[in-house]
Structure formats: C-alpha cells, structure tokens
Amino acid sequence: MEIQLLCVGKTDRSFWSDAVTEYEKRLQHYVKFSLVFLPDVKAHKKTNSSKIKKSETERILQKIKKDDLVILLDENGITHTSASFAKAITSYMNSGKRRIVFIIGGAYGFSDLMYQKFPLRMALSKMTFSHQMARLFFCEQLYRAFTIINNHPYHNP
C-alpha cells in the first residue's frame, strides 16, 4: 500500500516544509508515503482561472495511474473526526487499490473535469487554510490516523 499527497505549488517557507518532513518521516513507520509537488501555473493579469485550472488538471492527470484511488482535498468535501478519518483510511486500504492519492489543488481549486473524474472529496475543515498549512495538517492527521489504527499512544480520545 502506498499513500501519496499530490500538491500543486511548492512550500516556500522552511518552517512549513520542516514540519511536513517530520510527519513524512513518522509516516514511513506505517505506510509507504510520498509527497509530490507539481509546479503551479504562473498567472498573468489577463490569465483567467479556468485556463489555470485546465493546465493544472493536465499536469495532475499525468501523475495519476489508472488503478489509483483518488481523493480530492476540497472545502466542500466530507469532514471527518480523527477517528472517522482513521476508519476511512482503513477502508481505503482494504479497497484492493495499491495506491491512494490525495490531491491539494492550486489556488483556484479544481476544474470541473477533476470533479467528474474523481468524485471522492474530503475537507480538512470548514475553514480555509493556506495550501502550505493544509499540507501540514493533512500529514499530521494521516499520521494520527495510523497511530489510531495501530493503537499507539499519540491520539487521546
């Protein structure tokens, strides 16, 4: 089983990337986990958001394999508690898929094509976070989910 977090754009602050790296290391004890960063599309004043989303979609689709289970991290997705996220991860792992790919889109979100192709959506919160914060929060919650699954004393119910 492999879990991948696919992100549009880079983390430009070392304190965010250092924290994400810490959880990335911790996750290796439980699962093959990787982060993949795709360059964001540079917007000009005359570039409209639909063109940016289309270009980002093309880049994302190049990284998705036919048999991947794909979950879009989207503000309108399902929200979980940490315990219910752990149950969801267990369910995804038992789905028979070899790889689960969670995707954080670009600044303008996902294209309609992404929503059509990948109907599974999850929200980290009802609040809006920077993409860099979302990466960290996701990695921490994924680590927490694995500690719950494995009955390790990280999560206090």
Image (cartoon, rainbow, N blue to C red):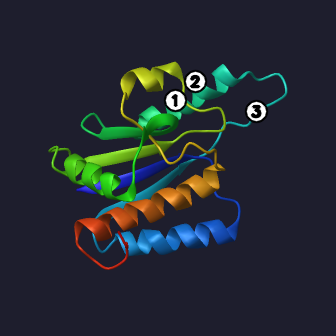
Q: Depth check: 140 or 26 in front? A: 140
The relative height of residue 100 versus residue 137 in the rendered view (above or below) is: above
Residue found farthest to the front: 157
Residue 40 bears which disc, if any?
none
Q: How many marks can you see? A: 3
In the image, taking residue 14 as reference, residue 86 lies left or right, namely left
Closer to the chain start, of discs 2 and 3, is: 3
Report, in whole angstroms, how far the alpha carbon at label 2 lies from the one at label 3. 13 Å
The x, y position of residue 73, in whole percent, is 48, 41
The x, y position of residue 10, in whole percent, is 63, 53
User: Dot 1 surroundings within 10 Å: few (below 14), some, or many (20 or more)?
Assistant: many
At label 2, the amino acid type is Lys
Q: Which residue is mark 1?
A: 57
Q: Which residue is mark 2?
A: 54
Residue at the (34%, 71%) spot, across then down: 28
User: Dot 3 surroundings within 10 Å: few (below 14), some, or many (20 or more)?
Assistant: few
Q: Depth check: 124 or 47 in front? A: 124
Under tag 2, what secondary structure?
helix
Residue at the (22%, 71%) spot, across then down: 150
Quarter-of-image position of residue 34: bottom left
Closer to the chain start, of discs 3 and 1, is: 3
The x, y position of residue 11, in whole percent, is 64, 58
Residue at the (29%, 67%) spot, across then down: 148
At label 3, the amino acid type is Ala
The x, y position of residue 105, in whole percent, is 55, 39
Under tag 1, what secondary structure?
helix
Labelled pair 2, 1 in contact (Cβ < 8 Å): yes
Residue found farthest to the bottom: 153
Q: Which residue is mark 3?
A: 43
Looking at the rendering, in which quadrant would you find the C terminus? bottom left
Residue at the (60%, 27%) spot, across then down: 53
